[in-house]
Image: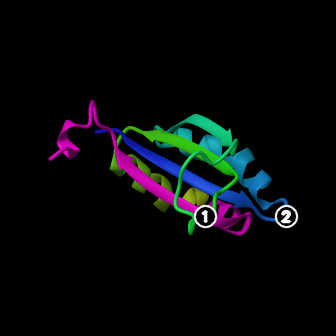
Amino acid sequence: MALYALNLFDLADNDLYRQYSRRSVAAVGKHGGRVVALGKLDRIVEGDENTEPRTAMVLVEWPSREAFDAFLGDPEYEDLHPLREDGTRNYLWWTYEKLEDLRPLLP
C-alpha cells in the first residue's frame, strides 16, 4: 500500500539543506519514492494558534512502508539524514497511508 511522507519545516541559516536536496532525489528514487509536491507557505487559512507554521513543504509518495523504511536505513546514505536534520528547524515529518476515500476514517 502506498505511503505518503509529509515534511513541514523551516530552513536553517546554513547550506546543509541545499546539500541534502542535491543528493536526496537519488536516494529517494533508489527506494521507489518520488516527490509529488513542493511548496512554500502561502498563507494560514485556519489552524491552531498555538502551532507555529512552517515555511516549506515536501510531499513524497512511497510504494510502501517497507520502501520508506529502507530509505531511512540505507547505509549508503547514512550521512544524508544529518544534512536534513541540521539544515532545517521546526521539522515535522508525518507518514500517511494512502486511502481511496475517507470512509475508513468515518464513524
Front-lying residue, 92 or 84: 92
**In the figure, residue 98 lies in which quadrant?**
top left
Residue 82 falls within the magenta-colored stretch: yes
Mark 1 secondary-structure assignment: strand
Residue annotated with mark 1: 91
- Amino acid type, label 1: Tyr
Q: On the picture, is 13 further left or further right than 93?
A: right
Q: Residue furthest right?
A: 14
Q: Residues within 10 Å of mark 1 (few under 14, many from 20)?
A: some
Residue annotated with mark 2: 14
In front: mark 1 or mark 2?
A: 1
- Amino acid type, label 2: Asn
Type of colouring: rainbow
Q: Position of residue 81 (x, y in %)?
A: 62, 62
Front-lying residue, 95 or 19: 95
- Please, is residue 34 above or below residue 45 in the view? above
